[in-house]
């Protein structure tokens, strides 16, 4: 026996479904459609009648019923009709023993914050393309003005976010901005990986993630912090775009400030801003992969073997980058400083083999270097703001901010508009292009997998390609 039926989704005053007692069952758009059909008995001979749904209308339900009945009569193994998506996703993640910590955190966030609230209540065998489409449509509406009542899926997503943030600083947990298409695609990639495994294990008769239309990817092209944009930002506090790039002069100003502040990780930020390394790459770089003695000084960006090694983005990230004279000098000085830290730590020293480490020798956390970068910009902005206020002498600024006088002298000279640590990669690209580097060289240096991506992203950032990259970074004169 196989048939379709309609199920009401109206709720009473307590929020519970009314069900069959709803007074409006015959209304055209009331409720949703489901199907029920017979499949071969289980191993104990018990009758099995799966219920599949919901569907937006009767036509869709009837089409799906035809497919399900044909599948049941085909003789192929019948998927488990009791396994829910929530149970499967957690089992799948628990079985991924070789994931890097950062990847596991991302998967967990995708599953607990989006996938389980959105589709976790469904049976895995009932999961269809329209369920995923409804989930991604609801995700696009998060943090956007609503036109009418939220859908049931969106209601669950918002409830999950509120529950997770309860007792916490919600602003620290989640951005108030709408989800980007890139974030939705990342969530889909996690689900696709899980469903692909389910299909191979015959827990699914087909993989619905293969035929879902995803939100179009929106390229966020970098914008240069020109004097006009800086002036407008100072007036309004608004950034011209989500991805901003410093001019060579601003990069030099940042370097001067870090050096004047005696920032321990100044060499790290210098390498990132001039060679375009990603956070994971600079944290994972090892001394054994660097050659500072050959005529061509190089740094090999290679992924480590253990699970705690920071991951790399693409196969193109396995590359060799050439180091200029300034970076070589900084790295040699850094190696000497690290040796002194090793002596001071004694037996407590952790021999991680990394180039950039904590004072204990332990690997750096990518999030930590991002936070440290942000704090440096906040420190610069605060010194600059207070310098313009009455009662803040250079001596007082240096004392309050625990900064050398040269640092509090440099900060007021010019503003440093906001950028992210990742934007230093864009700074490296613009410096190389401004120096006349070939676009293919820039693409290879950054580790982009496709040349056209580099060309499409950067050609309009710096209009004049003239002087060498190092010459384009003005530095303040050092006092004797």
Image: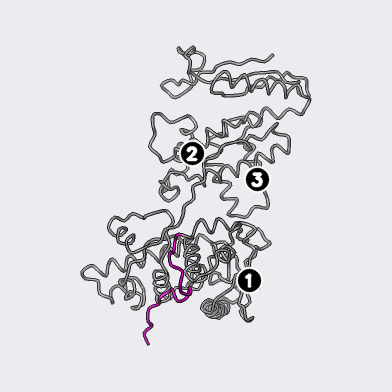
What secondary structure do most residues of the magenta stretch adopt?
loop
Q: Is residue 341 above or below residue 276?
A: below
- Dot 1 or dot 3, earlier in sequence: 3
Question: Dot 1, crowdedness within 10 Å: few (<14), some or many (≥20)?
Answer: some
The residue shown at (33%, 62%) is 230
The residue shown at (32%, 61%) is 228
Q: Quadrant of the image for the N terminus? A: top right
Q: Which residue is mark 2?
A: 139
Asked whether the viewer can see residue 300, the reply is: yes
The count of marks equals 3
Give how far apart the Cα atoms at labels 2 and 3 are: 25 Å
Give how far apart the Cα atoms at labels 2 and 1 are: 42 Å
Q: Which residues are magenta?
A: 460-480
Q: Which residue is mark 1?
A: 353
Residue 22 lies in the magenta stretch: no
Residue 478 lies in the magenta stretch: yes
Q: Is residue 432 above or below residue 206?
A: below
């Amino acid at each position: 026996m196989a048939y379709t039926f309609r199920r009401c989704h109206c709720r009473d005053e307590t929020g519970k479904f009314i069900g069959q007692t709803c007074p409006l069952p015959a209304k055209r758009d009331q409720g949703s459609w489901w199907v029920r059909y017979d499949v071969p008995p289980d191993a104990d001979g018990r009758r099995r009648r799966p219920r599949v749904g919901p569907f937006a209308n009767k036509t869709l339900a009837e089409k799906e019923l035809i497919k399900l009945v044909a599948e049941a009569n085909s003789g192929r193994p019948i998927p488990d009709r009791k396994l829910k998506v929530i149970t499967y996703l957690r089992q799948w993640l628990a079985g991924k023993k070789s994931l890097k910590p950062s990847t596991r955190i991302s998967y967990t966030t995708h599953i607990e914050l989006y996938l389980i609230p959105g589709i976790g209540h469904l049976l895995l065998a009932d999961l269809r393309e329209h369920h995923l489409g409804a989930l991604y449509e609801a995700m696009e509406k998060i943090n956007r003005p609503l036109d009418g009542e939220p859908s049931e899926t969106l209601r669950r997503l918002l409830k999950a976010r509120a529950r997770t943030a309860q007792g916490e600083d919600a602003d620290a947990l989640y951005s108030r901005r709408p989800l980007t298409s890139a974030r939705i695609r990342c969530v889909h990639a996690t689900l696709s990986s899980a469903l692909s495994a389910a299909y191979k294990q015959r827990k699914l008769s087909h993989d619905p993630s293969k035929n879902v239309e995803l939100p179009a990817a929106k390229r966020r092209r970098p914008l240069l912090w020109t004097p006009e944009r800086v002036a407008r930002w100072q007036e309004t506090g608004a950034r011209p775009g989500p991805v901003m790039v410093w001019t060579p002069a601003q990069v030099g100003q940042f370097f001067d400030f870090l050096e004047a502040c005696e920032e321990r990780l100044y060499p790290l930020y210098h390498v990132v801003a001039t060679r375009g390394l990603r956070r994971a790459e600079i944290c994972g770089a090892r001394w054994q992969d660097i050659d500072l003695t050959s005529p061509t000084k190089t740094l090999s960006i290679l992924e480590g073997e253990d699970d705690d090694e920071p991951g790399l983005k693409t196969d193109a990230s396995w590359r060799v980058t050439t180091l200029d004279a300034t970076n070589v000098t900084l790295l040699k000085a850094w190696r000497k400083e690290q040796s002194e830290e090793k002596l001071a730590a004694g037996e407590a020293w952790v021999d991680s083999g990394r180039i950039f480490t904590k004072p204990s020798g332990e690997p750096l956390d990518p999030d930590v270097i991002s936070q440290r970068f942000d704090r440096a910009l906040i420190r610069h902005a605060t010194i600059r703001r207070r310098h313009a206020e009455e009662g803040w002498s250079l001596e007082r600024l240096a004392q309050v901010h625990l900064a050398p006088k040269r640092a509090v002298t440099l900060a007021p000279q010019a503003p440093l508009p906001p950028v992210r640590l990742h934007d230093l990669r864009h700074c490296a690209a613009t410096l190389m292009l401004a120096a006349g580097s070939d676009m293919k060289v820039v693409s290879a240096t950054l580790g982009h997998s496709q040349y056209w991506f580099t060309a499409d992203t950067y050609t309009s950032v710096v209009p004049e390609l003239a002087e060498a990259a190092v010459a384009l970074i003005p530095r303040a004169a050092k006092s004797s």
